[in-house]
Image (spheres, coloured by chain):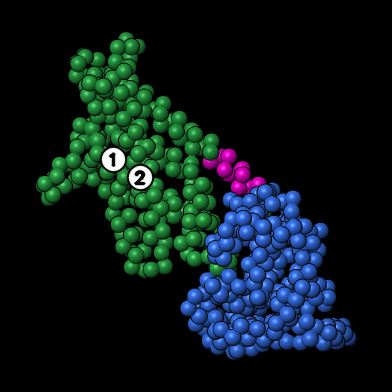
Amino acid sequence: MIEFEAVEKYFGDRHILKSITGSVSKGQVVVVCGPSGSGKSTLIRTVNRLESIDGGHLRVDGRDIHTVRNINELRSGIGFVFQSFGLFPHMSALDNVMIGLRRVRKLGPAEARQIAMERLAGLGLADKADSMPAQLSGGQQQRVAIARAVSMRPAVMLFDEPTSALDPELVSEVLAAIEQLADEGMTIICVTHEMGFARRVADRIWYLEAGRLLHNLDTEDFFKLRQAMRLEAASS
Amino acid sequence: MIEIIQTYWLDLLIGSYPNGPLGGLAMTMIIAVVSIALAVPLGVLLALAELSPRRWLSLVTGALITFVRGVPLLMFIFWIYFVVPVITGISIQGTTTLIIALVIFESAYISQIVKAGILALPKGQSEAAESLGMAPWQINVKIILPQAIFNMTPSLISQLSSAVKDTSLGYIINATEVTFATAQINSILLTKPMEVFGILAIVFFVVCTSLTGLASLLEKRLGHAQNAAGVRAS
Ligand SMILES: Nc1ncnc2c1ncn2[C@@H]1O[C@H](COP(=O)(O)OP(=O)(O)OP(=O)(O)O)[C@@H](O)[C@H]1O
Ligand SMILES: [Mg+2]
């Protein structure tokens, strides 16, 4: 579904992604973790070409997304959820969810509204449809952002630290929403530091360090390795 | 002074209308409002062109804006009033000249206001819209410009205030605005320039200070609203 093949990325002369190779198959949930500055955001942003790549290939559904002609069509099939939500503050929650359906999917107002309302309701936001983003809590805003992305019926959902801008008590409602998507069989790449969530939901863990994909392991193996490294660090 | 106002208030307000063209303060306001109303869309286009990823478009527009901002308004008035008829054979009447000159002049300044408004928006706004698959023009029309222009309303009102003041230059080319009306009253009375032009000063002061007052009031309101939103979003 998503294939990284020796992907390279530079910012100026700084080498940010170093020969990243790995793949995510349909329905899989991959959690990306690693220290701050290791390139997690950059990695996930290359998947819908918010960042260009400087070497290698990146294929989504078999299409090389860095040579594809109509990037907007491709992007509309890839949901992206940002750390800072990225809701449009001059539109109600409902309009935020509707705008992609109306302007990109070209649906009529009635149909777009119906789909948007269903999505909002599915995330427990039916009564917030007419609220402006500034009137919502961080957790509610992030769930609106998820509804907005999911309403486009994407083949993949990308999350870049979706809970790290939230007050601690609001984290779980957003994680629950992502978990629900995973249960429905959505293909997901999620950058997060929430290791409990990773352990519950992820099929594989990608561990980045200084731009290298240092580990690409089944979740269970990753946590075994982590445990072993902890013990080693503690005994040395 | 009161006497002069009592006698000539109608001339100050609407000029010699209905016996002649509309003039006075009414015309001043019409000229200023129409000029700004036309300059805003033009300024938006200039701002978008200057911010365009197409380098040549950005450079050409930037140079054009710098040029307009580096020349006094009076130059444009002279060119349109005296030079354009020589070149094209079409002479343009004073009020129309003033409006055209103001539109050119103000659109350059407004483009910088709009540009600042666009650049002040968080980068996440266009990235979120791009991620939905929206086309660049849709992102501008639906996401970026509504926010940028809304946030910049106070500056645009201040710009209207300076346009009101700048209409006084129309006097030179016989545009029938409030300065022209005042000068006519002065030449009827002959001996009262202090009172007559004192009235003109007060008229400008009241109108323009009200506008800038409104601008700073809005500025505060918007500031509060944004802070509230910002605190929630961070
Ligand atoms: N637009 C940019 N221009 C230049 N350098 C950048 C840019 N974006 C990121 N970087 C640099 O690239 C490196 C990787 O950044 P990235 O944001 O991908 O890290 P991250 O793993 O997501 O970190 P964090 O956990 O802090 O979010 C960092 O050193 C960062 O400073
Ligand atoms: Mg990051």
Residue B88, compared with residue A108, is above or below; it is: above
Other residues around mark 2 within 10 Å, as few (<14) / some (14–19) / many (≥20): some
**Drawn colour of chain B?**
green
Name the residue tied to disc 2. B38
- Image-quadrant location for residue A139: bottom right
Q: Which residues are magenta?
A: B219-231
Q: Is residue B146 magenta?
A: no
Residues tagged by mark 2 and mark 1 found on one chain of the structure: yes
Name the residue tied to disc 1. B99
Picture mark count: 2
Labels 2 & 1 near each other (Cβ < 8 A): yes
Please identify the quadrant where the N terminus of chain B is shown. Answer: top left
Q: Secondary structure at mark 2?
A: helix
Q: Residue B224's x, y, as percent?
A: 61, 43
Q: Residue A204's x, y, as percent?
A: 76, 83
**Drawn colour of chain A?**
blue
Q: Is residue A14 left or right of residue A231?
A: left
